[in-house]
């Protein structure tokens, strides 16, 4: 897939769109991120990192559910991005997903923004 264009993958409950903007890879999961759909997010995050895009912005504005498997995908991407000198920025989290990050303490290890625009300008 040409990474300069928007790509998507869909396994019913999760759709993931990817686009590059400047030095950032913007990944937008929509739907439910869980054990059954996690690979749909893991794959494009891994591809971005392999291609040297280490600033990942996750647009969570349409992510309706995230379980521990989904959280682990994001934590793994964060570790790899930081090891390469970048980071993972979460943007536009819905309250139900933000609560998972709050309960687990994961919000402390991510940079969280109100919107993708705010994440891109940071």
Image: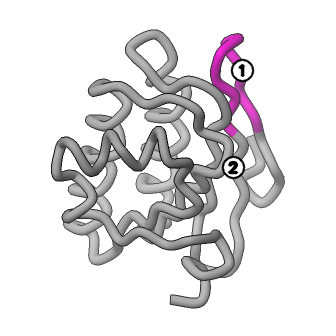
Residue at the location (35% across, 71% down)? 111
Task: Specify whether 15 is left or right of 59.
Answer: right
Residue 46, percent from left and from top: 43, 44
Q: Residue reaching furthest right?
A: 5
Question: Is disc 1 surrounded by few (<14), some (14 to 19) or many (20+) residues within 10 Å?
Answer: some
In this view, the residue in front, 70 or 49, is 70
Query: Which is the main secondary structure of the residues drawn in magenta?
Result: strand
The magenta span reads 8-16
Task: Point out the tag, 1 or 2, that comes first from the N-terminus.
Answer: 1
Q: Quadrant of residue 80?
A: bottom left
Compared with 35, 66 (above or below) is below
Q: Quadrant of residue 7?
A: top right
- Disc 1 and disc 2: Cα gap in Å? 12 Å
Residue bearing the label numbered 1: 10
Residue at the location (77% across, 60% down)? 4
Task: Specify whether 44 is left or right of 76.
Answer: right
Q: Quadrant of residue 76?
A: top left
Residue bearing the label numbered 2: 18
In this view, the residue in front, 27 or 110, is 110
Task: Specify whether 72 is left or right of 51.
Answer: left
Quarter of the image with the N terminus in it: top right
Residue 22, percent from left and from top: 67, 80
Which type of secondary structure does the marked residue at label 1 adopt? strand
Q: Residue reaching furthest bottom?
A: 121
Compared with 71, 31 (above or below) is above
Question: Is 12 a magenta residue?
Answer: yes
């Amino acid at each position: 897939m040409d990474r300069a264009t928007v790509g998507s993958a869909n396994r019913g409950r999760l759709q993931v769109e990817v686009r590059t903007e400047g030095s950032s890879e913007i990944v937008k999961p929509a739907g439910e991120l869980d054990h059954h759909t996690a690979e749909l997010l893991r794959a494009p995050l891994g591809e971005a990192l392999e291609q040297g895009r280490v600033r990942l912005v996750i647009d969570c504005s349409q992510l309706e559910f995230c379980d521990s498997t989904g959280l682990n995908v994001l934590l793994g991407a964060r570790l790899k991005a930081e090891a390469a000198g970048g980071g993972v920025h979460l943007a536009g989290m819905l309250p139900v997903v933000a609560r998972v990050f709050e309960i687990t303490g994961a919000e402390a290890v991510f940079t969280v923004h109100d919107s993708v625009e705010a994440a891109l300008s940071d």
